[in-house]
Amino acid sequence: MRRINVGIVGCGNISGIYLTNLTGVFADRVNVVAVCDLIPEKALAAQKKYNIPKAYFTDEEIMADGEIELIVNITTPDQHCPVNTMALAAGKHAYCEKPLATNREDGEAQVRLAAEKGLLLGGAPDTFLGGGIQTCRRLIDDGVIGDVVAVNASMRCRGHESWHPDPAFYYQVGGGPMFDMGPYYLTCLVNLVGAVESVMAYTRITFPQRTITSQPKYGTVVDVEVPTHIAGLMRFENGAIGTLTTSFDVYDDHQACVEVFGSKGSLLVPDPNGFGGPVKLLRADGRAYEEVPIEHGYCENSRGLGVADLCDAIITGRTPRANCAQTFHVLDIMCAFHDSADKGERVTLQKGFARQPALKADERF
């Protein structure tokens, strides 16, 4: 089977796991031929470490490379839309880190352009393809917990200024806990339950300023521009009711929580920021949750799995699982939470998202 020639734009911290996996675990589908970063030293270091044939220092240069079929865009969130748009305009497929864009309009424009060009556009997170969530998907699809009645999810922490080397962007427009961590939780939920029909939400900014206590910007004061505590309600198209809380404002030693409640039982879903387990099931006739064996692969850190799936989709002519209908639906939900809080009313989501088939237990890329 042929491989897809890939160019990586952005050689920051997260590029390491992408390059490790795309040049190793997923090399049967992916052929990384170029890397690009506006800081030449980063591009050259990545080129040398991962034995990449070409290094570029501007977006224009890598887009002009006729050998590249797919651009993997792992830049900062504010650059996701511009870089994706350049790739699509250059006739290349695109896959980007989360979120698809920082506003609904930019997301819509990308989806339209991809359709006009007949190109695939996909994006992170791809953790929903990991063994943990795929095992939960199988249990739900097989009716083990019956009809889904409700879901509850939350991401709670005190913010990132104590450990991240440059955390200011988390508190600027396009940041906040919803746009930072919401994609993991919402992508997990829409894959387990299906599309969201409408939402309502409340938001607040608890601390108008944040003081960075990590290096190298220790002591820098950051003005908070976006809500840092969001509590939302979701009505799914199948009638299930969900709650989602994302917060940078609270102290908690249990950051991740995803629960799915059905008419015949309940599931404790693993952290959607990871690929593995544990998965726990409570049956209607049971007295306590029991751990369920994970039957799917990719339980380790498999970032880049969505890229491999998209490359396989290009080769076989199918729809990728981490496609732009999904990334846009998640973006639409996140924007709708903020819109609902601002307007004090229920917001209806756009139609068009449908879950793709689950991974088979033995499926590999």
Image: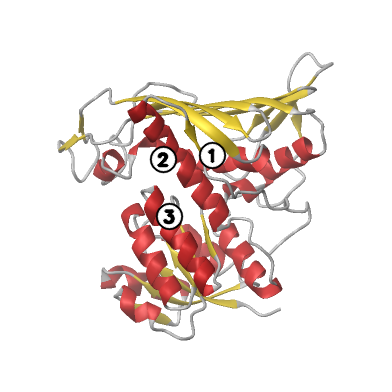
Residue 270: quarter of image: top right
- For disc 2, the neighbor class at 10 Å (few under 14, some 14 to 19, many from 20) is some
Which of discs 2 and 1 lies nearer the camera? The answer is 2
Q: Is residue 6 visible?
A: yes
Give the residue number, with chain letter if any, for mark 3. 107
**Mark 3: amino acid:** Gly
Q: Secondary structure at mark 3?
A: helix
Q: Residue at x 56, y 39 (%)?
A: 272
Give the residue number, with chain letter if any, for mark 2. 335
The picture places residue 361, in percent across and down from the top left corner, at 78, 51
Q: Earlier in the sequence, mark 3 or mark 2?
A: 3
Residue 175 lies left or right of residue 209; in this view the side is right
Q: Residue furthest top?
A: 287
Q: Residue at x 59, y 55 (%)?
A: 322
- Measured along the vertical axis of the image, is residue 68 above or below residue 278? below
Whether tag 2 and tag 1 are in contact, CB under 8 A, the answer is no
Q: Is residue 229 visible?
A: no
**Mark 2: amino acid:** Cys
- Measured along the vertical axis of the image, is residue 73 above or below residue 245? below
- For disc 3, the neighbor class at 10 Å (few under 14, some 14 to 19, many from 20) is many
Q: Secondary structure at mark 1?
A: helix
* Quadrant including the N terminus: bottom right
Residue 141 lies left or right of residue 244; in this view the side is right
Q: Determine the CA span between mark 3 and mark 2.
A: 11 Å
**Mark 1: amino acid:** Leu
Whether tag 1 and tag 3 are in contact, CB under 8 A, the answer is no
The picture places residue 83, in percent across and down from the top left corner, at 37, 66
Give the residue number, with chain letter if any, for mark 1. 186
